[in-house]
Amino acid sequence: MAQSTTTAAHPGPALNGRQLRLWQDLLEKRTGVQVVRRQENGIRTQIVRRMAEAGWTDADYYFRSLDTASGAREWGVLLDRLLVKETRFFRHQPSHEFVRQRIASLASDLESPLWLWSAGCASGEEAYSLAVDAAEGFARARREGNYYVVATDISKDALAKARRAVYPGAEPSNLPAFLGRYFYSHGPNQVAVDESLKQRVAFYAQNLLDKDNRYLNQMDVIYCQNVLIYFKAWRRRELINYFRDCLKPGGCLVIGPGEIADWQPPQMVRLDVPGVQVYQKRSQP
Ligand SMILES: C[S@@+](CC[C@H](N)C(=O)[O-])C[C@H]1O[C@@H](n2cnc3c(N)ncnc32)[C@H](O)[C@@H]1O
């Protein structure tokens, strides 16, 4: 019996090195995410804990069960435990300041709304930060806000938090003054995102390995930070080429500093912005 209740007579599940590698390979194949050596113990703990919760004692049986029809749901549960979803508002300030300036320069002469994409948005802080950047950019240009933010992630758990838009750890009174316009107090030491900002942001589940054609030539700004770092170099390049295809001519891709090195994405120009890694899609192919 591979699935049973753990008792004193039956110690909890365990995962040996070979079995751990099976999961590492599966995670990389399905999401692109590589597990580096220092993360191995954390991953092992999460898998073993999940096996105990779900009543699995044999790691090989559990692994094979993920390939069955009912395995898709279980994979979703496990995946939420394996991915690193650390994030925060305005995580990389210089990149956000770049986005504000970029929006301000585009805002004065617009025929249609501006579209921004937070790719790998985790629990939404990055997406709402981009929405604030856009609102502030339009305000600088003295124009009414005309923009939308699309935010995607593979983690359904993170997306549920993002849609709820309530975050612990801050009071609006502690936020810089202009942020008070976009957040309000929601119980002790919690802030909620104001409805006016929430309405600008739509969250969708998307695996970045499944390149979605919906976004082709649609985006003015694509913001993808702290996601590519988990991928192998060839996947990073593939993804950056996909992001380029999703930008409108002249649109910008903002990644984290150093997230690609020694490679110049074709049909894109690196902009000279101190501390920011940003590429602009050429207007002519
Ligand atoms: C460390 S968080 C970064 C969040 C945010 N971009 C930031 O910089 O604060 C990485 C996010 O990438 C997501 N992710 C990893 N692989 C993905 C994939 N193949 N498709 C979509 N999202 C993915 C994870 O679920 C996680 O929420």
Image (cartoon, helix red, strand yellow):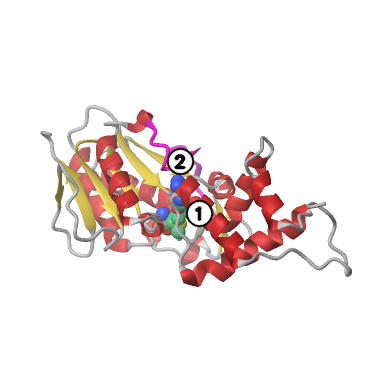
Using the image, tell me which numbered label, if any, was put on residue 97. none
| Camera sees residue 8 | yes
On whether ligand 1 comes within 8 Å of the CB at mark 1, the answer is no
Mark 2 neighbour density, 10 Å: few (under 14) some (14–19) many (20 or more) = few
Identify which residue, 140 or 28, lies in the foreground: 28
Name which of mark 1 and mark 2 comes first in the sequence.
1
> Which contiguous range is marked in magenta?
191-212
The vertical placement of 172 against 29, above or below, is below
| Camera sees residue 121 | no
Q: How many marks on residues?
A: 2
Identify which residue, 205 or 60, lies in the foreground: 60
The picture places residue 39, in percent across and down from the top left corner, at 51, 68
Q: Is residue 259 left or right of residue 156?
A: left
The picture places residue 38, in percent across and down from the top left corner, at 49, 72
Q: Residue at x 26, y 31 (%)?
A: 217
Q: Residue at x 29, y 41 (%)?
A: 243
Image quarter (top left, top right, bottom left or bottom right) of the C terminus = top left
Write down the quadrant of residue 115 in the picture. Answer: top left
The amino acid type of the residue labelled 2 equals Ser
Q: Is residue 111 left or right of residue 152?
A: left
The vertical placement of 47 against 252, above or below, is below
Q: Is residue 141 left or right of residue 179?
A: left
Q: Residue at x 37, y 57 (%)?
A: 178
Residue topped by disc 2 = 196
Residue topped by disc 1 = 25
Q: Residue at x 68, y 62 (%)?
A: 48
